[in-house]
Amino acid sequence: MLAVYNEIITLIRELRVTIEQIERRDTDLGRQMRRASSSVALNVAEAQNNRGRNQQLRFATALGSMRETKACLDVGNALGYVGEIDVAHAMRIDRICGMLYRLSR
């Protein structure tokens, strides 16, 4: 597995409680965040069995889902469902986005 995959799985584990907090207040937003974060890992796993443009598209899709996950955190915070995003989580998200961006090019 790629290093980015392990980073993604670690982030999902770290965000599990936050996703559950959001889901308790807003079922739709919580589900959206759960789907988006799962999509990141699933697209990266799928990309590893593809080559060329298909592989780039899977990594690009994973990047979009990672950004969507971050947006769900931002919206959850703006609506008062959760506090500010933890600095370590924000750094991990940025690192994952950077890795996915490079892989998608």
Image (spheres, grey):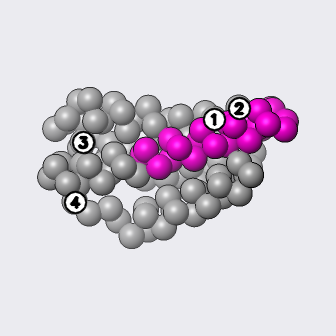
Type of the residue with mark 3: Ile
Cα separation, mark 3 vs mark 4, equals 10 Å
Cα separation, mark 4 vs mark 1, equals 29 Å
Q: Residues within 10 Å of mark 1 (few under 14, many from 20)?
A: many
* Residue 81, image x, y percentages: 18, 48
Residue lying at 65% horizontally and 55% vertically, measured from the top left? 101
Residue lying at 65% horizontally and 52% vertically, measured from the top left? 100
Residue lying at 44% horizontally and 68% vertically, measured from the top left? 88
Dot 3 or dot 4, earlier in sequence: 3
SS assignment at label 1: helix
Q: Residues within 10 Å of mark 3 (few under 14, many from 20)?
A: many
SS assignment at label 4: loop
Q: Where, by quadrant of the figure, is residue 22 drawn? A: top left
Left or right of 44, for residue 90: left
Residue 9 showing in the rendered view: no
Nearer the camera: disc 3 or disc 1? 1
Type of the residue with mark 4: Gly
Type of the residue with mark 1: Asn
Label ID, residue 22: 3
Q: Is residue 65 above or below residue 35?
A: below
Cα separation, mark 2 vs mark 3, equals 28 Å
Q: Which residue is mark 1?
A: 43
| Residues shaded magenta | 47-69
Pointers 1 and 2 in contact (CB under 8 A)?
yes
